Image (cartoon, rainbow, N blue to C red):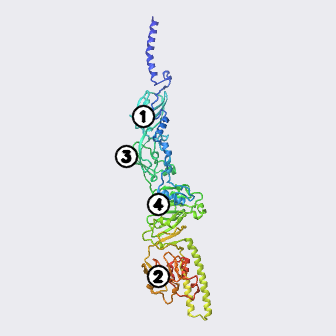
């Protein structure tokens, strides 16, 4: 009987314990060795997809939907949109620098190929793929990262309890741990998270250890404003930084700053990002992480300069205050292996002087502070070896133009292009009197002039010896004539040729000839003159008010007419355009009938009349070496008459 009672009691006890064991196994809270005294293994149901992601953090495939959406004409994805995004239009300054770099006046180079644009430094960033809201950002979570709703916490436990859990922070800021309960984690720094979770798990289990990591992170909404391709609100990863938000907005525009990107949180400016530090040095210390509601503002571009020629990276660079030639060369990657390391050319803009060109000593002027609109050109041995016809031309334009100054013109430019570069003519411009001088012509004229003076001096000396032999002893007249001739030679030596080229066109023309310019040419456009000059052997030489309808003889009369010692038959006139008209030279641009005297010609504004003295005993004045020939052949001009009269 006792054995039967014991058997019944054991059976009832077993029946009482069996539901509890089955209940514990059914919860999934512990399995296997937990009932045998080993480590407890905690499990959790597979979480539902959150924010379009699977439990493993990967984006769910939706290729069929995307294909149908595209077939229906829905917008493309961000990646496809970036691939099809056109290159931003160049700014006006980029086009100007590009034309200087290629020596071209149009959008094509000298070979007829499309011009290679010189873009602003960093523009390649605008062509990259934008940051998607699913991008988890950098793998290393900063210690001060704030945990919030939407974050996924990866919790690993080992020891007396084993678990690999993916815990989603809900909207209340809590995570649910099996057999432990809910834990408030919102607002904690990532560095504090391990301690809080270890304390809470330790209330249920002993002899364990744990590790904490961050899985998928929450998205935050930020605002990108200012000069970016697409300003607006953007959802980005909470681990994203200022740079990634700017990239999501397409990057700065051609007039947006790469060096003045501000992070604003509320009313405070927390950081100012200079992308040049990142692009040139890899320095992202100012690239702050973002929080929901942050504003990233891209300001307008600052002062810009261009660096072209023999450098490693031709580009347009944005300047900060005080940056120098040495700084922009460093931004351009330094000069190339074949660069001229001693002298460079600097094109500058001035409100009054227009475009000016000057040389920069790369050894002494490295500290030269550059200005907005400057363009620095580094020459190379390849440039020097190239024919001069293919190089840009430096031309000086002065006088009655809108912006006088030095201008660098592409190869093949003409005088009209030089006028256009200077902003055009003013209403007071006297085109007929334009003085066009050329350095190569001046050098040639100077050589010929010096040779003519040597020949003249030799002829004077030969004539003086002949006169002395005929008059023994020589009288005072012979000696005086020799002294006069020596003084004339000295006066002639004091006059220097100007290199002027006579431009053939009419007094009423408003357009200059289509003459190609050369390097170091100079064009001066005077205002309309109001007087006629009369010099030489006249009774009252000077300037007389110009009046329409008068001829040259009337102005000679105003000067008292020729003196008794004048050689009236050799009278000549220098026109404002530099041409010379005389009775002995009727082949100028303003020729006249041989029966017509010079005095009968109609006067033009700016005329200079010269009546030479009678020196009939000196043969050179009667032949090709008369005054008119000297002035016209050597480009001395009317100004020289003041030194010779």
Q: What is the secondary structure assignment of the residue under circle 3?
A: loop
Seen from the viewer's position, the closer of residues 69 and 423 is: 69
Name the residue beneath numbered marker 1.
Answer: 169
Name the residue beneath numbered marker 3.
Answer: 266
Q: Say if mark 1 contacts mark 4, CB within 8 Å.
A: no
Whether residue 371 is visible: yes
Q: Upstream in the sequence, badge 3 or badge 1?
A: 1
**Residue 232 appears at what percent x and percent y?**
41, 46
**Residue 202 appears at what percent x and percent y?**
44, 29
Vertical placement of residue 340 versus 202, above or below? below
Name the residue beneath numbered marker 2.
Answer: 552
Seen from the viewer's position, the closer of residues 21 and 201 is: 21
Name the residue beneath numbered marker 4.
Answer: 371
Q: Upstream in the sequence, badge 2 or badge 3?
A: 3
Seen from the viewer's position, the closer of residues 209 and 263 is: 263
What separation in Å lies between label 4 and label 2 (alpha carbons)? 53 Å
Vertical placement of residue 219 versus 385, above or below? above
Q: Answer with left or right where residue 137 lies relative to residue 447.
A: left
Seen from the viewer's position, the closer of residues 540 and 145 is: 540
What separation in Å lies between label 3 and label 1 (alpha carbons)? 26 Å
């Amino acid at each position: 009987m006792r054995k039967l009672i014991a058997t019944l009691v054991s059976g009832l006890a077993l029946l009482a314990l069996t539901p509890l064991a089955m209940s514990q196994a059914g919860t999934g809270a512990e399995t296997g060795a937990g009932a045998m005294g080993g480590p407890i293994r905690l499990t959790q149901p597979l979480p539902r997809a959150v924010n379009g992601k699977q439990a493993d953090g990967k984006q769910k495939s939706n290729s069929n939907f995307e294909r149908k959406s595209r077939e229906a004409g829905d917008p493309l994805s961000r990646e496809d949109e970036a691939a099809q995004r056109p290159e931003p239009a160049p700014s006006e300054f980029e086009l100007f620098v590009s034309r200087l770099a290629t020596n071209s006046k149009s959008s094509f180079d000298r070979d007829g190929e499309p011009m290679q644009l010189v873009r602003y430094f960093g523009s390649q960033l605008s062509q990259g793929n934008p940051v998607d809201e699913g991008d988890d950002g950098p793998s290393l979570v900063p210690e001060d990262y704030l945990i919030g709703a939407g974050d996924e916490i990866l919790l690993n436990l080992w020891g007396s309890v084993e678990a690999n859990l993916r815990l989603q922070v809900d909207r209340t800021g809590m995570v649910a741990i099996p057999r432990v309960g809910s834990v408030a984690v919102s607002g904690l720094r990532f560095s504090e998270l391990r301690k809080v979770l270890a304390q809470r798990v330790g209330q249920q289990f002993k002899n364990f250890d744990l590790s904490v990591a961050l899985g998928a992170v929450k998205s935050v909404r930020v605002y990108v404003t200012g000069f970016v391709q697409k300003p607006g609100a953007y959802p980005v990863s909470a681990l994203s930084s200022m740079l990634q938000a700017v990239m999501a907005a397409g990057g700065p525009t051609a007039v947006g700053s790469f060096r003045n990107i501000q992070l604003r949180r509320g009313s405070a400016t927390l950081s100012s990002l200079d992308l040049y530090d990142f692009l040139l040095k890899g320095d992202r210390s100012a690239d702050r992480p973002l929080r929901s509601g942050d504003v990233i503002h891209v300001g307008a571009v600052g002062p810009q300069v261009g660096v072209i020629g023999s450098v490693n990276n031709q580009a347009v660079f944005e300047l900060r205050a005080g940056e120098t030639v040495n700084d922009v060369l460093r931004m351009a990657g330094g000069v190339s292996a074949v660069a001229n390391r001693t002298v460079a050319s600097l094109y500058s803009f001035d409100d009054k002087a227009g475009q000016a060109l000057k040389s920069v000593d790369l050894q002494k002027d490295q500290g030269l502070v550059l200005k907005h609109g400057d363009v620095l050109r580094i020459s190379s041995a390849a440039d020097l070896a190239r024919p001069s016809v293919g190089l840009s031309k430096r031309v000086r334009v002065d006088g009655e133009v809108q912006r006088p100054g030095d201008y660098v013109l592409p190869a093949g430019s003409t005088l009209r292009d030089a006028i256009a570069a200077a902003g055009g003519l003013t209403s007071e411009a006297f085109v007929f009197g334009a003085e066009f001088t050329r350095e190569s012509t001046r050098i040639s004229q100077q050589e010929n002039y010096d040779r003519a003076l040597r020949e003249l001096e030799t002829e004077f000396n030969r004539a003086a010896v002949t006169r002395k032999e005929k008059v023994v002893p020589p009288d005072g007249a012979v000696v005086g004539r020799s002294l006069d001739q020596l003084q004339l030679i000295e006066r002639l030596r004091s006059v220097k040729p100007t290199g002027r080229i006579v431009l053939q066109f009419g007094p009423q023309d408003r357009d200059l000839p289509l003459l190609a310019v050369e390097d170091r040419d100079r064009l001066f456009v005077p205002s309309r003159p109001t007087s006629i000059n009369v010099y030489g052997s006249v009774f009252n030489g000077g300037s007389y008010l110009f009046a329409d309808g008068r001829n040259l003889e009337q102005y000679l009369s105003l000067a008292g007419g020729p003196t008794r010692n004048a050689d009236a038959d050799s009278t000549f006139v220098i026109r404002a355009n530099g041409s010379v008209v005389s009775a002995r030279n009727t082949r100028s641009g303003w020729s006249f009938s041989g029966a017509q005297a010079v005095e009968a010609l109609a006067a033009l504004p700016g005329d200079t009349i010269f009546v030479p003295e009678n020196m009939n005993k000196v043969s050179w004045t009667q032949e090709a070496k008369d005054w008119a020939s000297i002035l016209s052949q050597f480009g001395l001009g009317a100004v020289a008459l003041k030194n010779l009269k």
